[in-house]
Image (cartoon, grey):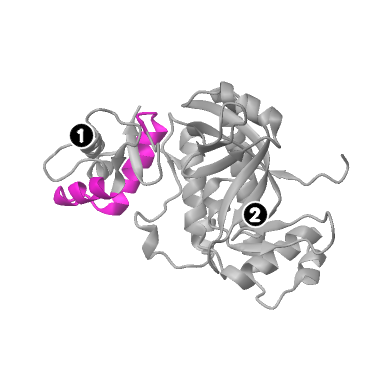
């Protein structure tokens, strides 16, 4: 089908931060979600771990809801009778397992300014870890390319789509970036660099991939930062200076502490898991900040020790 929209390789972190839509004005014309990096998304190709699925319909007419976790975020799927191939595949899948999905973006806005994003799959298949890793690499390359293009665009705040096209941008890139900058402002580059760093750490587990990002990205300027964007990736062996990030004042390993809290809050390994806010409360008593809890839980997910069965909950695998 010659007019089919691009299936973007995009991380959940970028997609779920989107709140801008461009509706098609003519019959059968496509609609788009515009991400903070200016990606005009109609369709996606995603890969990750299927961590949760639920049939909210009937056995005769199933309606599947599912959640797929990528490197540091979640995609939400809705599959019904109008996607028979995807629905049949979903019935045979078990969580957790690696899957790949091609599908269209759907949005839901319960109130003005709030946009919730889900995916209506055209096809969903089980894959191997090596396939997921290839997707990670492709998604990281695409995000890096978008970061560089946005960085180029913000150098001239007065530039419009025609100016960016003259610089070599495609029409869709130019329009998407201009709409994104007008709606969101300059994106916080460290949020996306952290995603890239997490992807590379997953792909290169024997290397200490370090972009030199600040520990608390919440304190970082909400803009594209040239110094951070120019920082080369470094690979080095662990040094004694890295110990304080994983060991608390009592000499205990912080990851083990978090795992212990999950055991305490979810002793039977329930389907729901341990509430993250309670984990953060207990961690604070041990001198571990909420930001550290997020970093530690990301690390434990990367190692395949825990996953997020429900939004705001953690469970051991």
Spatial CA span between label 2 and label 1: 40 Å
- SS for callout 2: helix
Q: Who is closer to the viewer here, 234 or 272?
A: 272
Residue found at the far right of this picture: 2
Crowd tier of the residue under label 1, counting other residues whose Cα lies within 10 Å: few below 14, some 14–19, many 20 or above: some
Q: Position of residue 153 (x, y in %)?
A: 67, 67
Magenta highlight range = 277-306
Q: Position of residue 71 (x, y in %)?
A: 48, 40
Helix, strand, or loop for circle 1? helix
Q: Percent from the top left, x then y, of residue 297?
A: 34, 41
Q: Position of residue 78 (x, y in %)?
A: 59, 41
Residue positioned 88% across, 42% down in the render = 2
Q: Is residue 222 depicted above or below 239 in this figure?
A: below
Residue at the spot 61% in from the left edge and 58% down from the top edge: 35
Q: Earlier in the sequence, mark 2 or mark 1?
A: 2
Q: In the image shown, does 280 or 172 lie closer to the viewer?
A: 280
The quarter of the picture where the N terminus appears is: top right
Are there few (<14), some (14-19), or many (20+) residues within 10 Å of tag 2?
A: some
* Direction from residue 299 to residue 179 in the image, left or right: right
Residue found farthest to the bottom: 158
Judged from this view, the residue extending furthest toward the left is 250
Q: In terms of depth relative to the viewer, which is nearer, 85 or 191?
A: 85
Residue 170 in which image quadrant: bottom right
Q: Please indicate, yes or no, whether residue 231 appears anywhere in the rendered image.
A: no
Residue that badge 2 annotates = 146
* Residue 80 in which image quadrant: top right
What is the magenta segment's predominant secondary structure?
helix
Asked whether residue 145 is drawn in magenta, I would say: no
| Residue highlighted by disc 1 | 260
Give above or below for 104 relative to 171: above
Which residue is located at x 69 percent, y 68 percent?
178
């Amino acid at each position: 089908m010659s007019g089919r929209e691009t299936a973007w390789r995009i991380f959940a972190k970028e997609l779920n931060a989107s709140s801008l839509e461009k509706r098609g004005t003519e019959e059968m014309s496509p609609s788009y979600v515009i991400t903070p990096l200016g990606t005009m998304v109609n369709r996606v190709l995603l890969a990750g771990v299927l961590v949760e699925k639920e049939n909210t319909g009937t056995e005769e007419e199933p309606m599947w809801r599912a959640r797929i976790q990528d490197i540091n975020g979640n995609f939400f799927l809705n599959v019904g009778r109008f996607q028979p191939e995807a629905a049949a595949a979903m019935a045979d899948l078990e969580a957790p397992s690696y899957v790949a999905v091609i599908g269209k973006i759907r949005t839901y806005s319960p109130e003005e300014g709030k946009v919730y994003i889900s995916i209506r799959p055209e096809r969903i298949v089980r894959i191997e870890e090596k396939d997921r890793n290839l997707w990670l690499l492709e998604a990281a390359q695409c995000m890096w390319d978008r970061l560089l293009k946005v960085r180029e665009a913000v150098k001239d705040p007065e530039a419009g789509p025609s100016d960016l096209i003259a610089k070599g941008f495609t029409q869709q890139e130019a329009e998407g970036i201009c709409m994104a900058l007008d709606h969101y402002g300059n994106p916080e580059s460290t949020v996306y660099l952290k995603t890239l760093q997490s992807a590379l750490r997953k792909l290169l587990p024997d290397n200490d991939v370090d972009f030199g990002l600040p520990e608390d990205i919440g304190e970082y300027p909400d803009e594209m930062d040239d110094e951070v964007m120019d920082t080369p990736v470094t690979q080095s062996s662990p040094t004694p200076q890295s110990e304080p990030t994983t060991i608390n004042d009592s000499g205990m390993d912080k990851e083990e502490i978090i795992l212990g809290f999950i055991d305490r809050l979810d002793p039977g390994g329930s389907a729901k898991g341990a509430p993250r806010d309670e984990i953060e409360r207990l961690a604070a008593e041990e001198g571990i900040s909420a930001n550290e809890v997020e970093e530690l839980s990301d690390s434990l997910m990367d190692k395949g020790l825990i996953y997020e069965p429900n939004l705001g909950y953690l469970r051991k695998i």
